[in-house]
Amino acid sequence: MNKLYSKVTSIELYKILFMVCSLLYILPKGDVVASILLKGMLVWGFLLLVIRFYQKRIIIDNKFFIFFIIFTLLSIIFNFQDGFIRNIKDFLYLILEVVLLTQVDKGDSKNILIFNRILLGFMTFGYTVSLLIFFFRIPQVPGFEKFIMSYTEGRLWGWCGNPNTLATMSLFGLFAAFFNIYLRKENLSVLNKLGYGFIIIEALACLTLSQSRSGFVGFAVLVFGAVFFIGIYKNKHIIGSILLALIIGIASVFMLEVYGWGLRQMPSEKLAISVNSNGYFSIQEDGSDGGEVNPSSSDMGLENREIGSDYSNGRFTIWKGGLSVAKENILFGVGQNALNDEVNQKLPKDYVKQSPKIAANMHNIYLQVLATSGIFAFIFFVLQFVNSFWKRRKEIFNDALKCMFFVLIGCMLIINLFDSNIIGFMNLFIAGMFWIYFGYFTSECADNKKVLFLINSLKIGGAETVLRDIVNHFDFQNYDITVRTLFSEGELLDEFSPFIHYSTVLKKPNPLKKAILWRCVKYLPSVIIQYFIHGQYDYAIAFLEGMPTKIVGSLKNTDCKKYCWIHTDLVHNFESETNYHNREQALKCYQGMENIICVSNDCKDKFLQIYPELKDRTIVVYNCLDIERIRMLSDEVVESPFLDKKSSILLCSVGRLVKEKGFLRMLHVIERLKKENVNLQWLLIGDGNQKDILKEYVKKHGLEENVAFLGYQKNPFAYMKLADYYVCSSFVEGFSLTVVEALIVGVAVISTQCTGPNEILSDNCGILCENSEDGLYDTLKVINKKKKELPREKIEKRIAQFRVETVLDSIYKLIGGQ
């Protein structure tokens, strides 16, 4: 059942069947079957859209796409009196093309290859037929032209069909060939290379020999793109590369035109096809005049060129009429259904009489959008392509194949100055292939893996500091990083690299909003909770237990790999697990993760005491620190608030002023030692909900000369360096970043025995005491008499385990990166 579901919801399989259905138009009288099947494809397509929206797997390349669709829909509503049903039908196909067909499932490489191979085989057949007709002067078979092209422009091309369509389809063949090479570049055999080379030569031959407007434009852009890329790649001189590309491109088109003129002078042989003065082929016997091969007398396209007409083949006349209509209906256009009648009123009567339905196609996609949907739709239609190219400029100019994809897409967009075949039902095959390959282009030219880190806030704390150090050192060439917080608050908000995207759920949090959000996360179903995360990501990482983990665990996007970090001892600090109704719900959430990452071995052991079922996916990755930065900051000169420095031992602690940090019992210890005439002075750095309680205790028990509250300090390391000892008095920890920070600045560490410090300070790298008030009391009393010397060499080796580079290597391997 799961296999059937995966096939039905496969976007790549959908593309294959869509292509096959649209190709049925090439068969004689295949319209009826194709029409029925395509209606079924339309229904299936919208079901796919609903499923992928539910799974949050719809990727919109940029917001301009959305605005283009919105203003197109507004145009239909505004023009509801003029063929509303027909316009809605066209709009549904537009959604199908622009939204669904541009989606890419990178994991479904098998169906991607099948799609490209089928298309490439079909193209190769068409190229071969076209070239055989040309080079061997194959005589026409009665009715053959109808099989080649059927009745509507743009269904299938052939040398005896429409030359502009042949040129356009040549570009798709090139894209399919290069994309196959791109997908298989690691294991291409010599035979594969020869085969693709032959197809590329055939496609280029059809493009150039078509002697059509599309052929000229496409050839010129290809030459321009190739020369421009070579110039950029070789010497990075952009202006020089553009000038050289323009010169060679113009010269190439001129030579091509001369060659075409020569073709038109060639004598034809008996029963052969030749090029007539109008640029079309004729069937000709000895001494006969020959009749034009015009496979369609249909009025659906510009297939007849009158002798003496301009090279635009009547397009200028249509464009003038279309512009007049667009000016008069500039905001929302006239709608597709009314376009033909509106433009006909602006055309010469004889012209309309000869081709009464020709104005339904503006033969310029940009003018088509402007006249049918208005100025706003037109602007966003253009901007969506500009934005897509601009966002990928680095990838385009650093990879030859990606640059070729860009050039081929650019060719199609420029060719559509003379055609309207990348949007619309009547050119469904060409339009469908364009958007499919545009989707491949935007997907493959944006290889950066999108990584989301979700955390409660950016208040100063161990997990938050580690997050800052990790993402600021990430490889931005290969990863697109987003940090999202539940609450927009914290001292670290401004300490992230400008290359990192930041977003939040609550911009102006307060206790009431936080309480509401907490209840939403706890009680709402996962299908709703997942929407606290915006956007599409390859990897979603909950960087803290509790709400972030539950939200990431709720994501339904099967293409997104999920991870969560555990920074605490869950046995003794189970508060974060209260976000779940019960253990079973928490277990289900953790089972949806690729890995559960604990920050120490003790942390991992405690986690597995609660969830032994998750042993196989639970691993350890140490927290990282920017060692050089910490040591540099520790050299800053600061003054101790205590005047008496010589007759006492100076202690320092850094952290949130909360119960689990054990700061209140530390005050008890200092009070007890003071009564025994042991003079200790303690610098307490940080802020939190116990601040007032602690200050009140100091005041009440006369400890003002022994304890100094420094609050939040942007640079706590300089104060750490002043101290004789750093003290971690915590009841529970996951890692204790500040313990490592103290070792980095060269201060001896005293810590209670708990998860994290037990591992960090093992092998005599620090002083561990019993996790109790008496344990702290006994240790501080002893060190007051004799300061303990610690092994610096061993400590330096221990510190090296927590370097940013070391930890990032582990993360890259974890998420399938470097």
Image: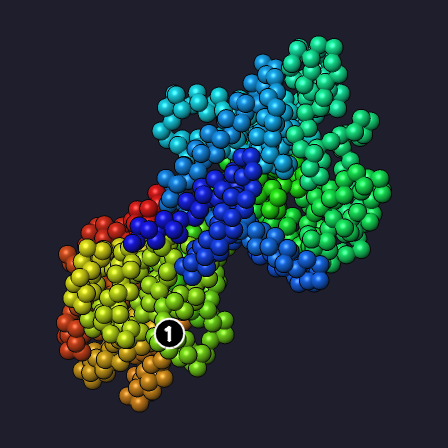
The quadrant in which residue 581 appears is: bottom left
Q: In the rendered view, tell whether residue 138 sits above or below residue 225.
A: above
Q: In the rendered view, tell whether residue 178 sits above or below residue 488.
A: above
Pinpoint residue 161: horizontal percent, then vertical percent: 63, 28
| Residue 27 seen by the camera | yes
Which residue does the image show at 71% across and 39% down from the upper left? 299
Pinpoint residue 643: horizontal percent, then vertical percent: 35, 75
Say which quadrant the N terminus sits in.
Answer: bottom left
The quadrant in which residue 470 appears is: bottom left
Q: In the rendered view, tell whether residue 149 sits above or below residue 534.
A: above
Mark 1 neighbour class, 10 Å CA radius: few under 14, some 14 to 19, many 20 or more: few
Q: Name the residue under label 1.
A: 524
Residue 536 shown left or right of residue 810 in the figure = right
Per the image, label 1 sits on a secondary structure element best described as loop
| Residue 396 seen by the camera | no
Of residue 26 and residue 278, the one placed in the foreground of this image is 26
Disc 1 marks a residue whose amino acid type is: Leu
Of residue 456 and residue 707, the one placed in the foreground of this image is 456
Of residue 180 and residue 383, the one placed in the foreground of this image is 180
Of residue 130 and residue 242, the one placed in the foreground of this image is 130
Which residue does the image show at 76% across and 56% down from the upper left? 330
Say which quadrant the C terminus sits in.
Answer: top left
Pinpoint residue 240: horizontal percent, then vertical percent: 65, 29
Pinpoint residue 229: horizontal percent, then vertical percent: 57, 30
Q: By what rule are the colours in the image chosen? A: rainbow
